[in-house]
Image (cartoon, rainbow, N blue to C red):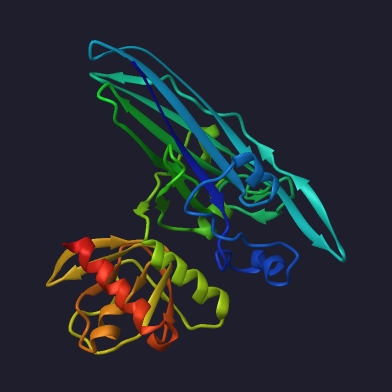
Amino acid sequence: MRIESAVTSVTWIPSEAIEGMPKLPFEIGVAHYDEPPSDTLGDLDKLRDADAFREANELRGWIEVKDGRIVDYGHEGRGLIGVTRIKLGPGRLAFPAVAFPLIQPEPEVGDGWVRFVQTAGGRMGLPAPRRVRGKPYFQLASASAWTTLQLILYADGRSKGSLVGASPFPRHWVYDREGKLVEKSGTIDFEKWYRESYGEKTPWGGEDTPAFVTAVETELERALSESVMKIDDKLPRRRLGAGETLVEQGAEGDDLYVLLDGVLDVEVDGETVAEVGPGAILGERAAVEGGPRTASLRAVTPCRVVVLESERISKYELTELALSRRREEA
């Protein structure tokens, strides 16, 4: 019996993700942020041609099973990298990106399973002169971005794909063999990436960065957060350092929060009951029920959130969001 599966990551630059002087081309419209990818992955080649992502990593594997034992296995994969387009007057200039060779270690074989790993990535073809940390203290080429995926196939027919390493910037989304969005990188660290992700501090130099992944928010949350951000990009923002508290259980208030970046713990009576990542909408219960906060929200990593008046989302949608959370807890 042959068992096949796949895992794919897509890398993209969300709005407001770049800081300092490097964001100027994005703010004046010379360069562009990316629209969030779909929750269902389409044709990668068409998406690349449409400039819908910066990079993609596709890993496919198979095993042959006979009498419950794995007798053969293999894998294949590819990396796709986009083109950097810069607006110049009425036209645009295209700078082909530089793709790095795939890294595919020898598969690891265990008792009833095989583990495949693949790293794909590259960098923009456009120069990015900047000071960096460590020798030679200056880089001309742009920083490197990458993802490292693992795919485990089991003799009983199960499979598990996940993101195990990634550049600190930009955002990475992961899709399963059916093309369904299943997890996200939870954090973005533009400064670390801009100053450190080159040379030896990449998988091609022997050093990867562990990925901090989070579960995917609900479809309703994703639709609501995207619509809110498109309507008004001047909404108040808050930044939290790791360990800081966004709201405290029992406190009064009915503001909502859209988590742009980072990971928050949801605590009830001092116990962590959930962990949420980018795209989550929080605070809906107090807005619906009119009582105090039912949970504390504490930053696991540095976070950026949008503060949103509850009136900006309909009572019906807030109620649906609160009910979906209760079903998840149940």
**Image point (35%, 85%), residue name:** 255
The residue sitting at the right extreme is: 90
Q: Residue at x 65, y 66 (%)?
A: 23
Q: Position of residue 190 (x, y in %)?
A: 53, 59
Q: Single out the residue that lies furthest toward the front.
A: 316
Q: Which residue of the protein is positioned furthest toward the left in this rendering?
A: 269
Residue 58, how many percent across, how many down?
52, 35
Question: Whole-percent x and y of residue 88?
Answer: 84, 62
Q: Residue at x 47, y 44 (%)?
A: 166
Residue 245 at least partly seen: no
Residue 194 in sight in this render: yes
Asked whether 46 or 86 is in front, the reply is: 46
Residue drawn where x is 43% and y is 40% of the image: 178
**Up/down of 44 relative to 19, above or below:** above
Residue 28, given in percent of the width and then of the height, sits at: 73, 72
Q: Quadrant of residue 86?
A: bottom right
Q: Is residue 54 left or right of residue 114?
A: right
